[in-house]
Amino acid sequence: MNKSRLKTIHDLPTPALLLDWPAARRNIEWAAAFVADKPVQLRPHFKHHKCVPLAKAQMEAGGCVGMTTATVAEAKALVEGGITDVLIANQVLSGLDQLVEIAERNTIRVLVDDVANAHPIAEAGLAAGFDIGVLVEVDIGTHRSGVHPGEPALDLVRHLIEMPGVRFDGLHAYHGHVVNILEPDDRAKSARVTMQLAIDTRRLVESAGIPCQILTGGGAATYKTIGKMDGVDELQIGSYVGMDWSYKERVGADFEIAFSVLATVISVSTQGMVLDVGVKGIAHESGPPRLLDHPNFEIPRFKSEEHTIVKAEGHGLSVGDRIRLTPSHGCGTCNLYDQIVICDGDEVRDIWTTSARGYSIPS
């Protein structure tokens, strides 16, 4: 898109991914203010938006020690954009040449949960002539990956400190099963119980005489609870910047929905209308999108690749009108667009590239 010709969102080709910049800025500033008087720092998750200018805005707001990514390629995009402290919150068994390339002159860490996935990292570091920082992932209940807390984690740490090519820097713990709990008190209780497993593991490692520099983890739905727990150093909140309707139901009033997808009405009837976006333009793992400006309109099914059918009798809209939809999964939706249109009301302020979208093949 040629941003010099785009003055308002009504000039945009659709579908288009919008970011309400005043709302996003308030979200960023709220998170920075939360950690301002606490020992804990932010390490926001880049996978939410994959946009380097947006990551820089998060860093510049304060309270951020660095960024979190899901892949080596995302970390590479951040490093090339000038952000030099990155945690790859995943086990890495491919793209080791890229990992070595960015780790040589930047602070890059990766996760391990077994000697088997630590060895390739160690071999790569040893061959390159420097140690690569690793965090031990502790499974605190999600049962996706990670070593069991307590003695099993300590046993792995003991192996790592004897392994040339890696440097043990700390622990990582994510309670993905907790962030989906809707009832706030129940979610907070589960967050405390599960993260305490990681804190106790940290104390066990330290009692064995092994320095544990970092305990990092959590998410936007649990930050208020674990951000106040002694022993947690970093919060990996991500979705707070742009939000989506599904996450908004869990975090409440703290953060605003800033991401939306702009669509055009391409057909109308007395029963409703059809929009020019479908499942190829809006991620819907947690449910169909919702109409941001028309909460009473209904999307009875969301299955078409390039169309959305809207049920709204007496809607009063015409062919060519624009409608904004908020997805149920913001992270997945961002990954579908090459660019994010930065808006203030209807005004187009800028267009930023989603630098790491589909960014997995070595350049």
Image (cartoon, rainbow, N blue to C red):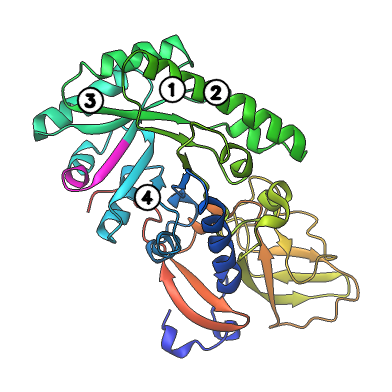
Q: Residues within 10 Å of mark 3 (few under 14, many from 20)?
A: some
Element carrying mark 4 = loop
Q: Nearer the viewer, mark 4 or mark 2?
A: 4
Q: First in sequence: mark 3 or mark 1?
A: 3
Q: Residue at x 63, y 24 (%)?
A: 193
Q: Residues within 10 Å of mark 1 (few under 14, many from 20)?
A: many
Element carrying mark 1 = helix
Write down the residue under mark 1. 202
Q: Quadrant of the N terminus?
A: bottom left
Write down the residue under mark 3. 120
Query: Against 138, is 341 above or below?
Result: below
Determine if the magenta segment contains residue 234: no
Range shown magenta: 101-109
Asked whether the beta carbons under mark 3 and mark 4 sit within 8 Å of each other, the answer is no
Q: Residue furthest front?
A: 37
Residue 202 placed where, x, y %?
43, 22
Write down the residue under mark 2. 140
Q: First in sequence: mark 3 or mark 4?
A: 4
Q: First in sequence: mark 2 or mark 3?
A: 3
Residue 296 placed where, x, y %?
85, 65
Q: First in sequence: mark 4 or mark 2?
A: 4
Q: Quadrant of the C terminus?
A: bottom left
Residue 263 placed where, x, y %?
64, 72
Name the side, left or right, on which 198 lies relative to 319. left
Q: First in sequence: mark 2 or mark 1?
A: 2
Write down the residue under mark 4. 66
Give amino acid for label 2.
Answer: Ile
Q: Nearer the viewer, mark 3 or mark 4?
A: 4
Element carrying mark 2 = loop
Q: Residue at x 56, y 28 (%)?
A: 195
Name the side, left or right, on which 61 lies relative to 276. left
